[in-house]
Image: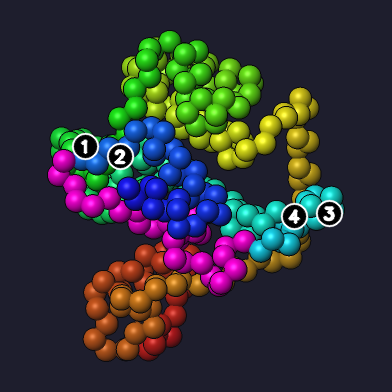
Amino acid sequence: MILYHIRSVVDDLNLITCHCLFMSSSELEKNSTARELRLDGLQSGIGQYVYHTPNVFGFFLPEYSAPGQITEANLVTPEAMVINAPTVVGFLNGAYSLIDLGLNSCFDGFGGTVINDCPSIFYNWYTWNPERQTMATLRYQPSTTDAETVVDELALLLTAGRLSPGSRRIVREAYDVEFIAANAASALRLAQKLVISTPEYHSTNTVKRKEQLRPDPEIPVPSQNEYKAIIILNLNGGMYGLACADKGIKTFSLTFIHSINNRYGRVQHAGSS
């Protein structure tokens, strides 16, 4: 129900729509031990969430044109106001977490906090139990383990069949390699990650690939000037700060300051010389 609720409230949330499309197409199912499904961290992860529009006009202004080639071509790209490198990476992080671990908060996932120590999953410190350690899991299973069929099914579900022949070939080859190296389940997860990373998944138009490679960027000439960096640490509240009284400094603060000193150089705090 939450998927359809999000879709019906705001119809211009492109990345949210992508995430909901993926969850519904991949047969997201609530686990028996979970309560109400909840999506967290979308505003910070992808820059969009229901009821979090910055103003009455929504997330996108219709006349917005992204700088560069879009502006030079006199085109408009309203969604580029929110969709940028950090939010695209944030979406992929959340989607990859969902594929690998189900709906929880681990590794920038968009679910609620279920596991306090996410890295321990990969160290096998405890038995992984998706029913208890995730809010929901993806239940989709292809009709066969044949690479071509699997990719065709994913293309139909996630891109309405618009996945280009070039993208299909890349996903098929990666699927076959992972299938041999690991198993069918691991190969399916890899194929899902690759498909949702394609341009066809993130757009509704036909993607036309260029055959030529992008030119290598020019290597800049190193400056002869001395370099100095100023590092600003935003502690975001709730912590013993770097600027402390001369007396009564907590051990944790001193340890933290010393670790910064060792890595970045001298950090000044009140009372220090």
**Amino acid under label 4?**
Val
Q: Is residue 91 left or right of residue 133?
A: right
Q: Is residue 17 left or right of residue 272?
A: right
Where is residue 223? Give x, y as percent: 75, 59
**Amino acid under label 2?**
Gly
Q: Residue at x 45, y 40 (%)?
A: 21
Where is residue 235? Give x, y as percent: 39, 72
Image quadrant where residue 139 sits: top left
- Is the image coloured rainbow, by chain, by secondary structure, or in one colour? rainbow
Residue linked to disc 1: 130
Q: Which mark is residue 225?
A: none
Q: Earlier in the sequence, mark 1 or mark 3?
A: 3
Q: Which segment is the magenta one?
A: 32-60
Residue linked to disc 3: 74
Q: Residue at x 32, y 89 (%)?
A: 245
Q: Residues within 10 Å of mark 1 (few under 14, many from 20)?
A: some
| Residues at circles 1 and 3 in contact by the CB criterion of under 8 Å | no
Q: CA distance from mark 2 to mark 1?
A: 7 Å
| Residues at circles 2 and 1 in contact by the CB criterion of under 8 Å | yes
Q: Earlier in the sequence, mark 1 or mark 4?
A: 4
Residue linked to disc 4: 76
Residue linked to disc 2: 102
**Amino acid under label 1?**
Pro
Where is residue 101? Give x, y as percent: 30, 38
Name above or below for residue 5 compared with residue 246: above
Q: Residues within 10 Å of mark 4 (few under 14, many from 20)?
A: some
| Residues at circles 1 and 4 in contact by the CB criterion of under 8 Å | no
Q: From where the camera sits, is residue 67 visible?
A: yes
Name above or below for residue 47 compared with residue 144: below
Which SS type dominates the magenta stretch? loop
